Image (tube, rainbow, N blue to C red):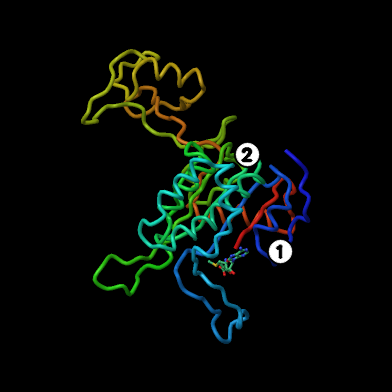
């Protein structure tokens, strides 16, 4: 890991490739990209909006692909180079140019990201499936964590077909520190996860298999016959791990209610959007957590 050699919390108004090429390797914790989607259109900011006058071209042509990008891609990522050449001439003729533009930038993202960093690539169905392969080549298939589907609208006016109302966020990371992306339990969740011990909060659930259609496992556990939902070796392991809840009061029928198993500890994962929003908010809040350095590409 190296020192961050650009000012933190800075907006760079230039080509992000130039910016990233000047950043030290492995010094960024988080990258979120909202890049062009290859819509083959020019976008202009609405008249009257604060961005009026701004425009950007989401149009890619083979002439825009620089020869040196292809050299870097071939040397750095031979598999990716084969993939790019393979799709040349497949489908939309502009896909190659768009993916080469993305590839050279994603290679830089990979270089500057810490080993324990995470990257979120926002795209839509125009290119999401092509970008997934590109990301797999660069960030490693095993580091793919999730494809987050963001429902942007509840309905869409594209009659005659299922509405295209979603964007996709491809999420990659190697060592994800889950604790840094947890958000506190809501009151409702805290009420449900009402027990607490050294492992964290938990909800008590029944481990008896009585009345379950699939039956259960019959053996003696602390003087009770079962049937149990788990085989004996599993229940012994859970007990050894301190994950069986022994209530102080006797349950119905006068027997000890061995009901209780940890279904969660610490906090719950929220919907992905909330989760990402929370992490970004934490990073950009005035009480900045200096452990995180983020790079937004938009
Ligand atoms: C899909 S838009 C995202 C806009 C922004 N995130 C928003 O929600 O308003 C893509 C943006 O990337 C910018 N962009 C395109 N190529 C870029 C590059 N090489 N370096 C920096 N920004 C670029 C465009 O100008 C455009 O504003």
Q: Note whether 117 is above or below 91 in the view shown.
A: above
Classify 10 Å Cα crowding around label 2: few (below 14), some (14-19), many (20 and above).
Answer: some
Task: Name the secondary structure under disc 2.
Answer: strand
- Where does the image place residue 176, in percent across and percent down from the top left? 58, 39
Q: Residue furthest bottom?
A: 48
Classify 10 Å Cα crowding around label 1: few (below 14), some (14-19), many (20 and above).
Answer: few
Ligand 1 in which quarter: bottom right
Q: Which mark is residue 116?
A: 2
Quick check: 175 left or right of 144? right
Corner quadrant of residue 211: top left
- Where does the image place residue 273, in percent across and percent down from the top left? 51, 56
- Where does the image place residue 113, in percent across and percent down from the top left? 64, 45
Q: Tell which of 34 and 202 is nearer to you.
A: 34
Q: Note whether 154 is above or below 198 in the view shown.
A: below
Q: Tell which of 284 and 85 is nearer to you.
A: 85
- Where does the image place residue 9, in percent across and percent down from the top left? 73, 58
Point 46% across, 50% down: residue: 84
Q: Earlier in the sequence, mark 2 or mark 1?
A: 1
Point 35% across, 71% down: residue: 156
Q: Tell which of 70 and 17 is nearer to you.
A: 70
Task: Name the secondary structure under disc 1.
Answer: loop
Q: Which mark is residue 11?
A: 1
On the rendered image, what quadrant is the C terminus found in?
A: bottom right
Quick check: 264 left or right of 277? left
The reply to whether the C-beta atoms of the residues labelled 2 and 1 are less than 8 Å apart is no
Q: Note whether 255 is above or below 264 in the view shown.
A: above
């Amino acid at each position: 890991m190296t020192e961050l050699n650009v000012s933190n919390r800075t907006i760079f108004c230039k080509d992000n490739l130039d910016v990233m090429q000047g950043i030290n390797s492995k010094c960024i914790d988080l990258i979120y990209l909202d890049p062009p989607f290859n819509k083959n259109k020019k976008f202009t900011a609405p008249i009257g909006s604060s961005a009026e006058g701004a425009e950007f071209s989401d149009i890619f042509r083979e002439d825009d692909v620089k020869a040196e990008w292809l050299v870097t891609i071939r040397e750095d990522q031979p598999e990716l180079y084969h993939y790019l050449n393979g799709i040349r001439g497949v489908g939309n003729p502009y896909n190659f140019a768009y993916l080469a533009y993305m590839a050279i930038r994603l290679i830089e993202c990979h270089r500057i990201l810490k080993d324990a960093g995470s990257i979120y690539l926002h795209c839509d169905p125009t290119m999401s499936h092509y970008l997934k392969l590109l990301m797999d080549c660069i960030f490693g298939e095993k580091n793919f964590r999730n494809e987050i589907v963001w429902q942007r609208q509840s309905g869409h006016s594209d009659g005659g077909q299922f509405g295209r109302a979603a964007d996709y966020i491809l999420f990659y990371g190697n060592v994800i520190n889950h604790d840094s992306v947890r958000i506190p339990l809501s009151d409702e969740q805290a009420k449900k996860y009402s027990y607490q011990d050294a492992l964290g909060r938990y909800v008590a659930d029944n481990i008896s298999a009585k009345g379950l259609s699939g039956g259960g496992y019959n053996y003696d556990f602390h003087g009770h016959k079962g049937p149990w939902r788990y085989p004996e070796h599993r229940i012994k392991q859970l007990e050894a791990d301190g994950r069986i809840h022994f209530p102080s009061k006797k349950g119905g029928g006068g027997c000890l209610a061995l009901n209780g198993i940890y279904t969660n500890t610490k906090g719950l994962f929220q919907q992905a959007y909330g989760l990402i929003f929370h992490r970004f908010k934490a990073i950009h809040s005035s009480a900045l957590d200096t452990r995180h350095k983020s790079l937004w590409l938009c």
